[in-house]
Amino acid sequence: MKKLIGVLALSSLAGTALAAGKPCDELKAEIDAKLQAKGVSAYSLEVVDKGSATDKQVVGSCEGGTKEIVYQRG
């Protein structure tokens, strides 16, 4: 019984960590590294509030889904 309670407690903590999402700076750095590895140049990545990206391509979501990372060539 104690093992079951321990497993349930750890599961709930892991679920909370996953639901929180990655910090925007960390995810932006990962996306930037992937783009550079593919040889992409002349682009910008920007962190914006969710839903405010109008003419840019959304390439990631962070801060528990409240922010988006947008990509624009240029």
Image: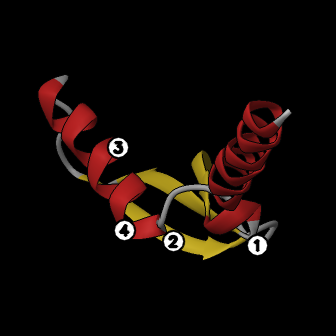
Q: Secondary structure at mark 2?
A: strand
Q: Secondary structure at mark 3?
A: helix
Work out whether residue 16 or residue 3 is closer to the camera in this orientation and state it.
3
Name of the residue lying farthest toward the front: 1
Amino acid at circle 3? Ile
Viewer-nearest of discs 2 and 4: 4
Tag 4 secondary structure: helix
At label 1, the amino acid type is Ser
In the rendered image, which residue does mark 2 sit on?
47
Q: For residue 69, what is the image quadrant?
A: bottom right
- Name the spot of residue 73 as percent of width and height, x first: 37, 49
Which residue is under mark 4?
A: 25
Q: Which residue is mark 3?
A: 31
Label 2 environment density (alpha carbons within 10 Å; few <14, some 14–19, many ≥20): some
Residue flagged by tag 2: what amino acid is it?
Val
**Marks 1 and 4, the one that precedes in the sequence:** 4
